């Protein structure tokens, strides 16, 4: 097809009507002065206190959008956009239950675990109107003929609101920090990192291994938000070890607390989210592998960088997250993408092109 996008149309094809209906709904939403929206996290994350409360000023004071708390007595007929976080579970039934409450509401999925549980994630996406993967390098399999891809919306720091984080960081200012490498992880039997953690624990001279089993995460998540921040802020550096090669929340939590992160080059999305120039400014240490000798050298470098940059470095790393990588920044990005998708010159179409499978996409008309 010479690289030209081919649009498939048949008046009797359900996907055509689906595309036209979604386009019309997005255009109608974009025409509104204010969109009323809400969000709900996946049930499993509620039990873990994975997300902070919804009192962040960035959520409440966003021009053109009115946040509405999802209470039990909420009148769903007045909600324009619902954002659901998906963490590897099958969300299809939940999405359909929301459709019963308000058939006109745009249901958006933000996939935090699209690097795992691919079958469940695809089921969830097929039920929704629009989806945003957090791991771009692992998103190709999600392309489908029902719901279009919004854009890449990475993970972020979500355990604290911006105001709460600033207050807690002020409490930690000037506190002595350990030179030991912080390894605060869940031990998943299926993940490559479990073996790495065990080896580093045994072979590195200074490691603080604060580990917990996957079936019981109380060691960390049962703590109050102040104690969780204090845990991070007690160290100068940490090693970012993803479950696969994903860019997870811990990178942002570490930077927020002022740590110098040691980041493997195998994390595919990292340079897209944190530019090389920003990495240098913030003192991020990159490594080609996680062999013990490599990590030992990286820890020495990270501690030296932390000591050299001092409190100014702590503040720079914290502000990097506070200014662009908190939960409200990601919600804002998705809401603005919804508005942009409803621009008059944009439409949803079932398309294919060279190197691209047949899927629902946004196109310029």
Image: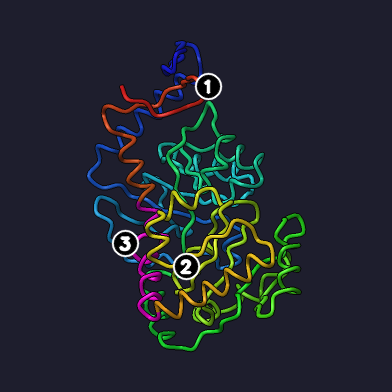
In the picture, the disc for residue 53 is none
Return the residue nearer the eye: 220 or 126: 220
Q: Nearer the viewer, mark 3 or mark 1?
A: 1
Query: Which residue appears at 49% of the width and 21% of the height?
Result: 15
Q: In the image shown, does 50 or 307 lie closer to the viewer?
A: 307
The residue where tag 1 is placed is 358
Please report the bounds of the magenta region as a residue range: 310-332
Where residue 221 sits: x, y (%)?
A: 60, 72
Q: Is residue 28 above or below residue 182?
A: above
Q: Is residue 2 magenta?
A: no
Residue at the image point whose x is 66% and y is 45% from the top? 117
Give the crowd class for mark 3: few <14, some 14-19, many >=20 residues within 10 Å: some
Q: Does residue 311 sit above or below 125 in this rendering?
A: below
Residue 7: give x, y in percent of width and height.
43, 16
Going by the image, does 62 lie left or right of 14? left
Dominant secondary structure of the residues highlighted in magenta in the image:
helix
Q: Which mark is residue 52?
A: 2
Badge 2: how crowded within 10 Å, few (<14), some, or many (20+)? some
Q: Residues within 10 Å of mark 1 (few under 14, many from 20)?
A: some
């Amino acid at each position: 097809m010479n690289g030209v996008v081919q649009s498939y149309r048949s008046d009797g094809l359900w996907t055509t009507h689906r595309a036209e209906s979604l386009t019309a709904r997005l255009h109608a939403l974009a025409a509104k002065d204010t969109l009323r929206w809400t969000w709900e996290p996946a049930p499993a994350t509620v039990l873990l206190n994975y997300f902070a409360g919804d009192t962040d000023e960035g959520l409440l004071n966003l021009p053109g959008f009115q946040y509405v708390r999802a209470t039990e007595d909420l009148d769903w007929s007045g909600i324009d956009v619902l954002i659901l976080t998906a963490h590897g579970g099958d969300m299809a039934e939940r999405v359909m239950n929301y459709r019963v409450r308000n058939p006109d509401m745009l249901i958006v999925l933000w996939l935090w675990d699209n690097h795992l549980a691919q079958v469940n994630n695809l089921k969830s996406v097929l039920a929704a109107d629009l989806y945003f993967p957090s791991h771009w390098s692992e998103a190709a399999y999600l392309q489908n003929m029902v719901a279009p891809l919004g854009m890449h919306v990475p993970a972020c720091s979500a355990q604290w609101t911006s105001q709460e984080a600033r207050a807690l960081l002020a409490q930690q200012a000037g506190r002595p920090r350990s030179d030991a490498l912080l390894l605060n992880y869940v031990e998943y039997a299926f993940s490559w990192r479990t073996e790495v953690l065990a080896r580093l624990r045994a072979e590195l001279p200074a490691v603080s291994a604060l580990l917990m089993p996957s079936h019981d995460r109380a060691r960390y998540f049962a703590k109050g938000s102040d104690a969780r921040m204090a845990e991070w802020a007690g160290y100068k550096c940490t090693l970012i070890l993803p479950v696969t090669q994903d860019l997870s929340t811990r990178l942002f939590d570490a930077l927020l607390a002022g740590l110098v992160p040691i980041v493997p080059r195998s994390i595919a999305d990292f340079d897209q989210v944190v530019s090389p120039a920003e990495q240098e400014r913030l003192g991020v240490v990159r490594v080609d592998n996680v062999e013990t000798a490599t990590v030992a050298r990286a820890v020495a470098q990270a501690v030296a960088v932390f000591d050299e940059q001092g409190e100014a470095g702590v503040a720079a790393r914290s502000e990097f997250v506070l200014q662009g990588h908190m939960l409200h920044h990601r919600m804002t990005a998705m809401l603005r993408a919804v508005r942009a998708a409803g621009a008059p010159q944009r439409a949803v179409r079932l398309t294919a092109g060279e190197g691209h499978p047949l899927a629902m996409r946004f196109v310029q008309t």
